[in-house]
Amino acid sequence: MSAEFWNMGGYALYVWGSFGAALAVHLWNVLSARAQRRRLLDSLADSEGEQPVDE
């Protein structure tokens, strides 16, 4: 690919920064949902007197 593509016509900082921010938010959303699911499953297991689910 050409340097002009990666430079994005002088807007590379904004374009790649936006991609980076979107990726960070997406990763945070996925990891947060997984952690919340884990806490919920552990809480349910505790309330039923069972061992926590190990995945």
Image (spheres, rainbow, N blue to C red):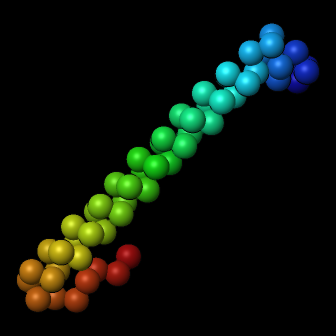
Image quarter hosting the N terminus: top right
Query: Looking at this view, is 15 or 55 the one in front?
Result: 15
**Residue at x 80% of width, y 10% of height:** 9
Image quarter hosting the C terminus: bottom left
Residue 12 locus on image (x, y percent): 76, 21
Question: Does 3 sit left or right of 42 as displayed?
Answer: right
Residue 6 locus on image (x, y percent): 82, 23
**Residue at x 48% of width, y 42% of height:** 26
Q: Is residue 2 above or below residue 21?
A: above
Question: Does 55 sit left or right of 9 as displayed?
Answer: left
**Residue at x 30% of width, y 69% of height:** 38
Asked where in the image residue 39 lies, by quadrant, the reply is bottom left
Q: Is residue 43 above or below residue 37?
A: below
Residue 11 locus on image (x, y percent): 74, 15
Q: Residue furthest right?
A: 3
Residue 34 appears in the picture as rendered: yes
Query: Looking at this view, is 44 or 24 the one in front?
Result: 24
Residue 19 locus on image (x, y percent): 62, 31
Q: Is residue 7 above or below residue 36?
A: above
